[in-house]
């Protein structure tokens, strides 16, 4: 039985759980802060975090490098339970003994009731993620006036309205239509392999055509797309999903989304996991994401070959006629270019 069938077989047992939950470490305590693990899916999620952090710390080694997880948000489709986790990840340096570990706030919704997400369905989830992310301010207040963590954060519920298959919201499009693509590219190019916007757009179009050719039920890729922190994330995330859904049938998939800021703070990445979630996927939230061989990274497209072997094997480029490729003028035009265009 496939993982989609597993979700469907348990769908009748799944209910939205708007209760605010948490798991992780803060420098005010020598152990984990954890809300009640009274649901199996919460135990499974905490276990995924534990194993993922262990992988990250092991690959960081024992040197002096920063072992903090960058500020992140994620939408995770649990493979063993019919629940989707929406979570924010903040790292305050670990516990009072200096042992590293992030702190996570999260809620859960039934997976089967919310396929995709698609560009028209992701905005309610982005609102939930934003609500979870701003809790960092209250954690700062907790540091200044420590007490019982449960007393400050327990008993809360998060608004989960809109997280169902019937919601369609394209309110991000007007902003996307006003966002000049050169402005977005100029801000993003520090994290790209090329500073040539026309070349990158042309390479992205060819890459997208290849994705459309490979699309099938057994095609389970992991994509990584650049984000710019100074531009609304809703416009960019919905835009990347719009770009992807013209090449893949997102309505028939349960995607996991992981969004993480780069250490420098000016850029970040959206990772789209179009398959069953595994433990190593936690690294998509960390600086180790670039080392994962199974990730197709749009940030790496358009650059020159980096090794002698790649340079030898690369096809020689023939200059394209000046009018052969029309570079999109806006972010909306870019994400709405269809395969074969």
Image (cartoon, grey):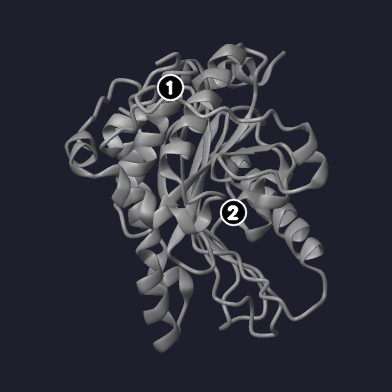
Instruction: Kindly identify the residue that appears in the image at 70 percent across and 85 percent down.
Output: 97
Across and down, in percent, residue 254 comes to 53, 26
Crowd band around label 1 with a 10 angstrom C-alpha radius: few (<14), some (14–19), many (20+): many
Q: In the picture provided, is 69 more to the left or to the right than 309?
A: left
Across and down, in percent, residue 177 comes to 20, 36
In this view, the residue in front, 302 or 278, is 302
Q: In which quarter of the image is residue 271?
A: top right
Q: Is residue 141 above or below residue 1?
A: below
Pointer 2 residue: 285
Q: Which of marks 1 and 2 is nearer the N terminus?
A: 1
Pointer 1 residue: 245
Q: In the picture provided, is 21 more to the left or to the right than 303?
A: left
Across and down, in percent, residue 140 comes to 40, 79
Q: In this view, does 92 lie above or below 72?
A: below
Query: Marks 1 and 2, Cα distance to the nearest angstrom?
Result: 23 Å
Q: What element carries label 1?
A: helix
In this view, the residue in front, 127 or 258, is 258
Which image quarter is the N terminus in? top right
In this view, the residue in front, 56 or 176, is 176
Instruction: Kindly identify the residue that appears in the image at 35 percent across and 43 percent down.
Output: 236
Q: Can residue 161 be seen in this view?
A: no
Which image quarter is the C terminus in? top left
């Amino acid at each position: 039985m496939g993982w989609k069938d597993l979700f469907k077989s348990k769908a009748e047992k799944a209910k939205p759980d708007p209760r605010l939950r948490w798991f992780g470490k803060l420098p005010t305590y020598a152990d984990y802060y954890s809300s009640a693990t009274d649901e199996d899916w919460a135990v499974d999620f905490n276990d995924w975090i534990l194993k993922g952090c262990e992988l990250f710390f092991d690959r960081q080694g024992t040197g002096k490098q920063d072992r903090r997880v960058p500020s992140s948000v994620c939408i995770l489709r649990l493979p063993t339970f019919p629940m989707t986790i929406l979570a924010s990840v903040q790292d305050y340096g670990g516990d009072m003994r200096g042992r590293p570990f992030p702190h996570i706030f999260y809620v859960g919704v039934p997976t089967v009731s919310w396929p995709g997400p698609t560009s028209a369905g992701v905005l309610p989830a982005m609102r939930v993620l934003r609500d979870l992310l701003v809790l960092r301010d209250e954690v700062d207040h907790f540091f200044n006036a420590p007490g019982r963590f449960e007393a400050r954060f327990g008993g809360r519920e998060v608004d989960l309205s809109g997280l169902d298959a019937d919601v369609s919201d394209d309110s991000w499009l007007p902003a996307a239509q006003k966002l000049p693509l050169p402005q977005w590219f100029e801000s993003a190019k520090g994290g790209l392999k090329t500073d040539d916007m026309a070349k990158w757009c042309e390479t992205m179009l060819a890459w997208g055509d290849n994705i459309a050719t490979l699309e099938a039920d057994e095609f389970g890729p992991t994509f990584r797309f650049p984000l710019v922190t100074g531009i609304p994330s809703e416009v960019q995330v919905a835009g990347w999903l719009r770009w992807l859904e013209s090449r893949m049938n997102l309505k028939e998939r349960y995607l996991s989304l992981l969004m993480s800021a780069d250490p420098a703070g000016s850029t970040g990445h959206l990772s789209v996991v179009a398959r069953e979630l595994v433990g190593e996927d936690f690294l998509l939230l960390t600086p180790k994401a670039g080392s994962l061989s199974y990730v197709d990274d749009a940030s790496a497209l358009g650059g020159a070959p980096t090794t002698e072997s790649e340079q030898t094997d690369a096809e020689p480029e023939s200059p394209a006629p000046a009018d052969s490729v029309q570079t999109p003028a806006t972010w909306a035009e870019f994400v709405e270019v269809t395969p074969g265009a």
